[in-house]
Structure formats: structure tokens, C-alpha cells
Image: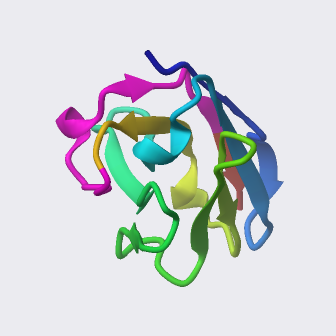
């Protein structure tokens, strides 16, 4: 069982930055691929970025490439989402997700555990 708790959301102006954190319980954090998803009002939850358990390989949705970076600290059981050059269309609830596999994939249903979400609002 893995419990995930996100933090770091808030209100920021367009062009600004935020860093989200996701703290995970359990002693085998490095066995889980991690990802961030987001869900805007009236839209489906979508993949944002993912990272392998080792942290060696990452992937990102086209909409955030070059602006968002995922990283992890397995010693601290924490994954991070650094968001730069934020746009109003990045406004959403951001969710941390864990998958009992070495691969981070884009499919929402492939993830086993989810956090409660943290709101990110970007004003224009």
C-alpha cells in the first residue's frame, strides 16, 4: 500500500513558477514509477509528466515539454514537479500517481495509487 500526499499548489501569475511535491509512504518507493496528472474543470484527467523508479528516464506531454520537469528523491520518498513559464491553461488540480512498475506510462488507469490533488491556478 502506498499513500501519496501532494503539496505546493497555489495561485501564480502567468510566466511564474511553482514546485509541487508528493510525499509517499512505504519503504519501496524506488520500485514505483511516478507521474503527475492534472484535471481542469470540465475536462478529463490527463497525463503531464512521468518518471521511472530509478529516476533515469522521464516523459512529458507535449503541452508542457520544455516548461515542466519531474524529479524524485528516493531517499526522501518524494517526487517533485517543477513548473516554469506557467500559462493560464495550466490551471488545474494536479495529482500525483504511483504505478507498481518500472515504467511510467500515460494511461490513467495504469496507476495504482493517487494523491488527493493540489490546486494550481495561473492568472493572466
- Near-viewer residue (59 or 57): 57
Magenta: main secondary structure equals loop
In the rendered image, residue 75, in percent from the top left (x then y), is placed at 72, 47
Location of residue 41 with respect to 73 vertically, above or below? above
In the rendered image, residue 10, in percent from the top left (x then y), is placed at 78, 40
In the rendered image, residue 12, in percent from the top left (x then y), is placed at 80, 54
Q: In the image, is 12 to the left or to the right of 122?
A: right
Residue at left offset 55%, top offset 20%: 116
Residue at left offset 74%, top offset 40%: 9
Location of residue 70 with respect to 65 vertically, above or below? above
- Residue 103 part of the magenta segment: yes
Q: Which residue lies furthest to the bottom in this view?
A: 66
Q: In the image, is 80 to the left or to the right of 53?
A: right
- Near-viewer residue (69 or 94): 69
- Residue 47 part of the magenta segment: no
- Res. 36 visible in picture: no
- Near-viewer residue (19 or 85): 19
Location of residue 41 with respect to 13 vertically, above or below? above
Location of residue 65 with respect to 83 vertically, above or below? below
Q: In the image, is 33 to the left or to the right of 95?
A: left
- Res. 55 visible in picture: yes
In the rendered image, residue 33, in percent from the top left (x then y), is placed at 39, 49
Occupied quadrant, residue 88 = bottom right
- Near-viewer residue (68 or 71): 71
Q: Which quadrant does the N terminus fall into?
A: top left
Q: Which quadrant does the C terminus fall into?
A: bottom right
Q: In the image, is 13 to the left or to the right of 124?
A: right
Residue at left offset 42%, top offset 73%: 57
Residue at left offset 20%, top offset 38%: 110
Label count reads 0
Q: Residue furthest front?
A: 27
Q: Which residues lie in the magenta part?
A: 102-119
Amino acid at each position: 500500500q502506498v499513500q501519496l500526499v501532494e503539496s505546493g499548489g497555489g495561485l501564480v501569475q502567468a510566466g511564474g513558477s511553482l514546485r509541487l511535491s508528493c510525499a509517499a509512504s512505504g519503504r519501496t518507493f524506488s520500485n514505483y514509477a511516478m507521474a503527475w496528472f492534472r484535471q481542469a474543470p470540465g475536462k478529463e484527467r490527463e497525463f503531464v509528466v512521468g518518471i521511472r523508479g530509478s529516476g533515469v528516464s522521464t516523459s512529458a506531454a507535449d503541452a508542457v515539454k520544455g516548461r515542466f520537469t519531474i524529479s524524485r528523491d528516493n531517499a526522501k520518498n518524494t517526487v517533485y514537479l517543477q513548473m516554469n513559464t506557467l500559462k493560464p491553461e495550466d490551471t488545474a488540480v494536479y495529482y500525483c500517481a504511483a504505478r507498481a512498475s518500472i515504467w511510467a506510462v500515460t494511461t490513467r488507469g495504469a496507476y495504482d495509487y493517487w494523491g488527493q490533488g493540489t490546486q494550481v491556478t495561473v492568472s493572466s
